[in-house]
Image: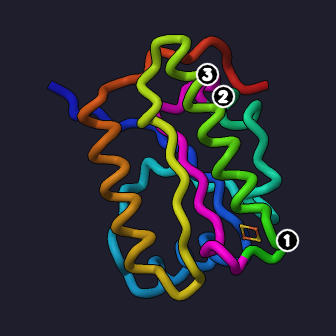
Amino acid sequence: MEEYKPTIVAFCCQWCSYAAADLAGSMRLQYPPNIKIIRVPCTGRVDIIHMLRAFELGADGVFLSGCLVGDCHFLRGNIRAAKRVESAKEILRSIGTDPSRLEMYYNSSAMGPQFAERCREFTKRIIELGPSGRRVSKAA
Ligand code: FES
C-alpha cells in the first residue's frame, strides 16, 4: 500500500517564519517535503479566502506562521491573522471539515528547529486525519 503523503500549505511571513524555514534548511534539519511554503509579507496579508482556497485546490492541511506576538513588522498583522484563522476554523467546522486542519503558529527567524518541529507535528496530525476530500478545482 502506498504511503499517504498529505499536501500542506504554509503561509509564512517573510520576516520571521520564512527565515526560520531557511535556517532549518541551513541547519540540515529534516521536515516533511510535502509542505508547500508560500512567502507572504506578513500573515496579516492572508485572508480567510486564501486559507479556504488552499483547501479547495487540494490542501489537506494549512497553517500560517507569523512573527512572535509583539514582533510583527506591521504591528498587529499576526494578531489579525490569528483571528481570521479562528473564523476560518468555524467555516471549516460548519462544512464538516475538522478545524484542526488549519493552524496558526508563531516563529522568530531564529527558531529554525522549532519551525521544523512544528512542520513534523502538523504533518503527523494531518496524516492521522487523512485526506481532506475538499478539493473542488484545479489551480488556474
Ligand atoms: Fe511577520 Fe506580520 S510581519 S507576521
The answer to if 140 sits in the magenta stretch is no
Q: Which mark is residue 52?
A: 2
The residue that mark 1 highlights is 74
Query: Which residue is pictured at 48% across the width and 51% down the height?
Result: 35
Amino acid carrying label 3: it is Ile
The residue that mark 3 highlights is 91
Left or right for 44, reference 24: right
Residue 115 screen position, x and y as percent: 45, 70
Displayed quadrant of residue 65: bottom right
Residue 106 screen position, x and y as percent: 55, 67
Displayed quadrant of residue 38: bottom right
Q: Earlier in the sequence, mark 1 or mark 2?
A: 2
Vertically, is 137 above or below 57? Answer: above
Q: Is mark 1 within 8 Å of ligand 1?
A: yes
Crowdedness near tag 1: few (<14), some (14–19) or many (≥20) residues, C-alpha within 10 Å:
few
Query: Which residue is pictured at 76% across the width and 59% down the height?
Result: 40
Residue 63 screen position, x and y as percent: 54, 48
- Dot 2: what SS? helix
Crowdedness near tag 3: few (<14), some (14–19) or many (≥20) residues, C-alpha within 10 Å:
some
Left or right for 37, reference 27: right
How many angstroms separate mark 3 from mark 1 (CA)? 26 Å
